[in-house]
Amino acid sequence: MAQDSRSARELYDESVGSWARTQPSSLSDFTARPSVLEMCRPFDGMRVLDLGCGEGYCSRALRRSGAAEVHGIDVSNGMIEAAKHEETREPLGITYEVGDATDLRLVPTHHYERVLAMFLFNYLNTEQTRACMTEVARLLEPGGRFVFAVPHPSLPWLRDKVPPFYFDVGETGYFAARNTRWPGKIWKRDGTQLEVQLVHKTVEDYFDALAAAGFERMPRVRELRVTPGILSVDPTFFGPLGETPLHLAISVER
């Protein structure tokens, strides 16, 4: 399988219309986002940074659930325009800007109590991931919490290239695939599909990046999957995933 040469900015500028939503629609809206947002709690009255915010789906959920200040940053102009459009349609007081998650020098030190990065690091290589996590460590207040989710690193080697979620790494091995951008697809419940990407990193890479950034406390780790409650919503759609580990979610305090 050929590697995906498009940048994350190009991919999401092209597909922004497919991602815009006000209700859960894609697989990960059920299997990942609710659990990861719960890992951010408590965040009532807190300042939250949503890195890789896309069109603002999680930013809006955070604000509606009590966050005092939410700021979203994404590399895609199209996604930020979509987020701003929704903010105009339903004003929640969220601010959005186009930016690079590896260079947040304009953001004040110790400004946030929570930083969320939902499926950001699967678009960054190891060096970029370390740079981003170093910036996050600077932005967080002492005692603040960093929560992020990525596709489970083992997923491409556990699933065939079939709906409702896969990455195509061809015949490349788990370690040999590191730092290469691979194409994938994730489905919505209406049968349509979304193009996604994976710059593969091992579990070790993520923990090494956290340590290099200065996070010293023991992280909380969750392997997210289809639970019985999720399965009951739509057995036909979620059933094929069975016991597959879909996402890795990590929460660590500064």
Image (spheres, helix red, strand yellow):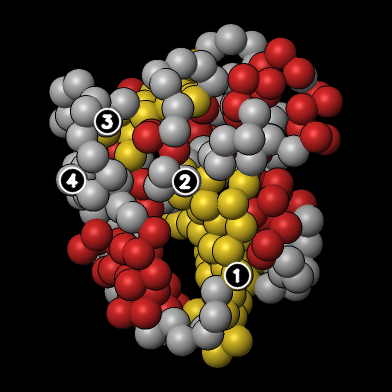
Q: Which residue is mark 1?
A: 220
Is there CB contact under 8 Å for labels 3 and 4? no
Q: CA distance from mark 1 to mark 2?
A: 15 Å
Pinpoint residue 86: horizontal percent, then vertical percent: 61, 36
Q: CA distance from mark 2 to mark 4?
A: 17 Å
- Residue 152 is labelled as 2
* Three-letter code for the amino acid on which mark 2 is drawn: His
* Residue 193 seen from this side: yes
Q: Which residue is mark 3?
A: 169
Residue displayed at 56% across by 41% down: 245
* Three-letter code for the amino acid on which mark 3 is drawn: Val
User: Which circle's residue, 1 or 2, is located before the other in the chain?
Assistant: 2
Which quarter of the figure is the N terminus placed in?
top left
Is there CB contact under 8 Å for labels 2 and 3? no
Q: Which residue is mark 4?
A: 176
User: Which circle's residue, 1 or 4, is located before the other in the chain?
Assistant: 4
State the image quarter where residue 78 is shown: top left
Q: CA distance from mark 1 to mark 3?
A: 28 Å
